Image: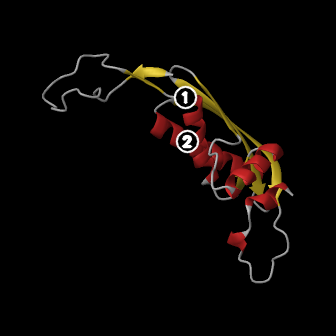
């Protein structure tokens, strides 16, 4: 994806009185960057337990254990010149209405990608491939302390 850069090139004059000629540079936004923006937006929706399919969630649990994370896991973006399409695979929390959750995820991704990336979103496909059911409460362990690993068991 390429479009005209609205920011001056390094070393260019920062004086607003100096007009820059059109075409002072270009900006390329990768599919990975768009996927990360979409993934972060989707994870922020209440009722989304995690993103990705079983194998990608297992890999994510390993990444989390070593202090790394992949914000684009479970998200695929196809970037064109001015438009983008996003596919999201997610795990929902049991008790969350699934169609409503998909609509909320879709709205969050549309807003985040259009605002932060500046591309028109033509579609957001949401696949809910699992439902997370919390196990019995462990004595003395708060619900927030449950790990991502529990989602793949």
Which mark is in front, 1 or 2? 1
Residue labelled with disc 2: 37
Q: Which picture quadrant has residue 21?
A: top left
Q: Are marks 1 and 2 in contact (CB under 8 Å)?
A: no
Can residue 100 be spotted in the picture? no
Residue 80, relative to residue 139: is it above or below?
A: above
- In depth, the one of 123 and 113 nearer the eye is 113
Q: Position of residue 24 (x, y in %)?
A: 30, 19
- Quadrant of the drawing holding the C terminus: bottom right
Q: State how many labels appear.
A: 2
Q: Residue at x 59, y 30 (%)?
A: 31
Q: Residue at x 63, y 50 (%)?
A: 69
- In depth, the one of 81 and 102 nearer the eye is 81
Q: Residue at x 64, y 45 (%)?
A: 70
Q: Specify the label residue 106 is tagged with.
A: none
Dot 2: within a 10 Å radius of its alpha carbon, few (fewer than 14), some, or many (20 or more) residues? Answer: some
Residue labelled with disc 1: 30
8 left or right of 135 in image: left
Q: Residue at x 63, y 48 (%)?
A: 42
If you read the primary sequence from the N terminus, does the residue marked by circle 1 or circle 2 appear first? 1
Dot 1: within a 10 Å radius of its alpha carbon, few (fewer than 14), some, or many (20 or more) residues? Answer: some
Residue lying farthest to the front in this orientation: 66
Q: Position of residue 138 (x, y in %)?
A: 81, 78
Callout 1: SS: loop
Callout 2: SS: helix
Q: Position of residue 84 (x, y in %)?
A: 58, 28
152 left or right of 110 in image: right
Q: How is the image coloured?
A: secondary structure
Cα–Cα gap, marks 1 and 2: 11 Å
Q: Position of residue 59 (x, y in %)?
A: 76, 47
């Amino acid at each position: 994806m390429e479009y005209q850069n609205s920011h001056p090139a390094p070393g260019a004059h920062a004086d607003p009185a100096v007009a820059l000629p059109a075409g002072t540079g270009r900006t390329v936004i990768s599919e990975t960057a768009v996927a990360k923006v979409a993934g972060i937006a989707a994870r922020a929706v209440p009722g989304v337990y995690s993103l990705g399919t079983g194998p990608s969630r297992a890999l994510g649990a390993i990444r989390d254990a070593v202090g790394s994370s992949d914000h684009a896991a479970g998200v695929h973006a196809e970037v064109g010149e001015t438009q983008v399409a996003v596919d999201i695979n997610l795990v929902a929390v049991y008790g969350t209405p699934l169609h409503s959750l998909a609509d909320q995820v879709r709205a969050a991704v549309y807003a985040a990608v259009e605002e932060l990336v500046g591309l028109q979103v033509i579609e957001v496909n949401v696949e809910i491939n699992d439902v997370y059911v919390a196990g019995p409460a462990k004595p003395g362990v708060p619900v927030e302390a449950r790990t991502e690993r529990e989602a793949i068991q």
